[in-house]
Image (tube, helix red, strand yellow):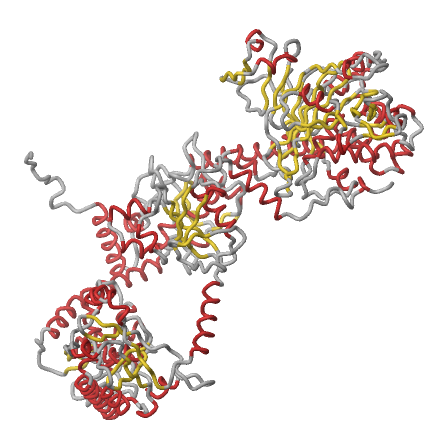
Amino acid sequence: MRNTRPSTRSKNKRSRAEENAEATAEAFRRILSTKTPNEDDIHQLYMLWKPVCQGCRVNTKDNPNCFCGLVPAPNGSRKSGLWQKTSEILHSLGFDPSEDLRKPHSPAGLTNLGATCYANSILQCLYMNKSFREGVFLVEPEVLKEQPVLDRLARLFAQLHSSKKAFVDSAPFIQTLELDNAVQQDSHEFLTLLFSLLERCLSQSKVPKARTIVQDLFRGGVSHVTTCSKCGNESGASSKIEDFYELELNVKGMKTLDESLDDYLSTEELQGDNQYYCGACATRVNASRRIKLRSLPDVLNIQLKRCVFLPNTTTKKKITSAFCFPEELNMTCRLSAGSRSDSIYNLSAVLIHKGPAVNSGHYIAHVKDESTGRWWEFDDEVVSDLGQEPFGGDSSKPSSAVSIEPSSSTLKGDIVDGDQTKAVPQSDLVNISHVKTFSSCDAYMLMYTRRCADSGRKRKPEKCNGDKMEKMLHMPGEQRGTSLPHHLLEEVEEMNEVYLDSCEQYKLKKESEINHITERRQEVRSILSEAPVQSVDKQYFWISAEWLRQWADSIISSAIDNHPIQCSHGKVSVSKVSSMKRISAEAWTMLISKYDGGPTLGKDDWCNDCLLEVARTMASADNYRDERILMKDIAEAALAGKIKDGKLYYVSKSWLHQWLKRKILDSPCEGDAGPTASIRCPHGGLMPEQAPGAKRLLVPEDLWQFIEKSAMTVKPDDTLGCLTFPSDTEPCAQCGVELSEVTSLEDNLRELRMRERQNHEKLVTGRTLPIVVGRRYYLLPAAWLSSWRNFVGSTGKNTGTAEPEVLSTIIDSLICEKHSRLLERPPDLVYRRGLILQKAPLTEVLTIISEDDWRLFCESWGGIEVRGVSAEIVSNLSSEEELCVSFEEIPISEDNMTNILNDGINGESKRPMIKTCPEVCEECIGERESHELMQKLDYSNENICVYFARGKEPPKSILEASGKISELSRRTSKRSRKSALGNYKTLVVSGSTTIYQLKMMIWEAFGIVRENQILHKGSKPIEGDSACLADLSIFPGDFLWVADSEIHEDRDIADELSDQKMDIQTAEGGFGGTLLTSNI
């Protein structure tokens, strides 16, 4: 280690703070002598001598010339106030409406009112269909007034068409339909009911295209054809054509749309008990039944039946398997003979349901713009551009679907999904070799638009004036060529005007706020740069440091307030020098001219009266400190017994000790009060010294006078705490008598304890009682005996231990009022080491004592000897075995009780019995135990422990465990405890928790499928799922263990939880009570 020489640079040098304090004290001493300060004194006391501070991190209080830290660094900011980040200051202005401004060429979204995503997705699909949108706009205003649903739909479409906002409020339309915003519904059911409602509403229109727009676009025809296998005739009902608005196709077990369509149009054979009665053959014959597509609509809606019913659980479950569908769908070959052949469709919309459960999740829609060919994702208010693909062309964008291109790699059997390549069977690629195909696990409904319908809907160019053309150029691409009716256009333009006006108002307010902040920041920096006083001779002014700080940090400042730094004489207080700053005349002029206020405190406004007052106070403090130091030496001598001759006075000894420990201050403090409070008796005299806390000490007269003066300075009204007790004061006679009585009572209790210890030596020392057959014994509550031991064994400071209760009362509490029998069972006895012993004296309710102990207890503690609970020992030993019993007394304690218990395990079969008088009342005991058991089982939010036995059997300690975790840790070694505790979980349960719910918790904790769980408590298996924990007597703190049978295949717990939620939900009400199911 290198030797270092101690530094002597600072040796014998005082710090700058000490030098400043000395100079300040010298200035006040000079003022006290001359009564008037000079210029040097003013400079020293008001700290004018300190230099202008440069580069401090914080504003220094002890330098009136420091202006650092009032503003941040040039590029810095603060969490609040004027120097907060501009973006955060503007946040206080509220929401910027321009953030909701609609982007050019982008459709508008719809607000989600809680759980209305199912309706939003359907409305977006309908609106993006140009023909349907135009049909709604053609409805006459008078019809709209009579049909509120149609009116709200037209207004909603008009806002989606021309609104300047990025999203439109769907609340008016949803409220008109009287839908519940908080209930998730099925989008397919909503669309079906909405079509039915719109057909009825549109039927009132006189415009042909508007009146039948739903039927023209979405209605097709099917027939259910039954053909006799014998004669070949079709049934009469086969020629009947039924309308359809969507095709409901099975998804379960299907991989592609072609497979689902083939399944939908497949032939069903009617045979056996299901034979068909043929009128031509006049008998039941075999037949075939199939669906024939008679006509197809321009917009073909395909509903994918992802919701299936589970008969075992009577619940619904969603199918989440991948399903492929083409971009181009050729339905020509699937039409019946004689139908039109132009049946090639292009994919125009995909409705997606996200989430594993049927009655929850979220709906979004991917819709194609007919005008531009671009795809858009409608997720309530958010609308995203997907490009030319229905699921987006960006591979980095997460999606539930993949595109299958008809490339060479695809034909070889691969699907490109991001960076991974999935093998596809060659059979799945038959129908995708010529068209682009997409795959999705969440696609819920598909919309296909007839190709010839697209190509045939060409609009002729309209003649437009300049303003109208300008408006059309600023509309999104899918809106061009569609003009709004006048009554709808006016409403939308008015809403746009209000919205754009709010954007403009916010913009102006934002610009005004930014300009104000910029001006304020420049002003603060400018004034603070002029604030330092460069020369002592120049004029300067005083200003409140707190006001200056708030002014430099506030966006809006108040008037100057210098009152906090004024003294009572209206001048500059020298005691407030750390709370004020000295600024130049130029800075003061700029501040006072703009903010007004005051009062003005200049260079010559120092207060002579305050300076003299402070000088006198400092002189008094110096005198007090010097006198206190002198008195401290005298007090230490008094404690040491070195008292000089003269008049002496009593003070509290403990008070004087604390007085000496306190730091010497400039004046008396709270601790100097009450020097004789603890030695004063309640009668106002001197407390006898034998009383607790009344130790006293004699001190000289000069020390007492200093102590009394200090105490009365702090508390002038506390005369009782500072009573004078000269050395010849006699102690209070009345207190002396009372103290003698207390002493006598303590002597009596001491004698009682001594006598009790002598009379009951065995019970006091905790020795076990040797029990002899045929001898009479008595039973006492173990709790009373414990309180008796505490009483007789208390010594010293513990002599205040309460006496045990009266014995007769305790015995009466053991007897039931109804039958006059014993309410507690007697303790168990056992043969151990040749002795008859009480089996567990430390844990049982009653304890056996001898007849002599009972008699002496009755004499001392108010017992009635004849009313005691006697006990007679009944032995099941032979006479030879009884002769072997010795009566050696052994000490009983917690340390040797464990060994005694272990030795007695083999003697359980030879356990002697106790016959009591009065007899045990089994009826009352049974009722009480039953009530206690019910209370223990009626628990809520308590812990139990579950151990996962990964091997064939759990450790022995787990099988024996029935209590808490701490009991397990005492029974096992550190190594086994480390491995065991790593496999257990603490679960919060209630008495009403079912075994099914417990298994779900275990599934979530350990990942063991519910059906694979083999649950035990100890060695007893727990079977069934419907029983609750209270039924199986599982208490708080119990230790269960579980094994994994590994029979059933692992599955995701989310599926089970979603089904469980459906089970506890109320029955689905659908759209009952809404306008969708009413007759308008």
Residue occupying the far right of the picture: 206
What percent of the width, then of the height, locates residue 49? 29, 43
Q: Is residue 793 visible?
A: no
Which sits in the foreground, 175 or 35?
A: 175
Q: Is residue 390 visible?
A: yes
What percent of the width, then of the height, locates residue 348? 71, 20
Left or right of residue 754, residue 420 in this image: right
Left or right of residue 899, residue 352 in this image: right
- Above or below, 134 relative to 565: above
Which quadrant is home to the N terminus?
Answer: top left
Which sits in the foreground, 689 or 245?
A: 245
Residue occupying the far top of the picture: 408
Which sits in the foreground, 607 or 728?
A: 728
Q: How many marks?
A: 0
Which quadrant is home to the C terminus?
Answer: top right
Which sits in the foreground, 198 or 305?
A: 305
Q: Residue at x 32, y 58 (%)?
A: 611
Q: Residue at x 25, y 65 (%)?
A: 905
What percent of the width, then of the height, locates residue 367? 69, 23
- Above or below, 293 relative to 614: above
What percent of the width, then of the height, locates residue 508? 64, 32
Quadrant of residue 340 within the rendered picture: top right
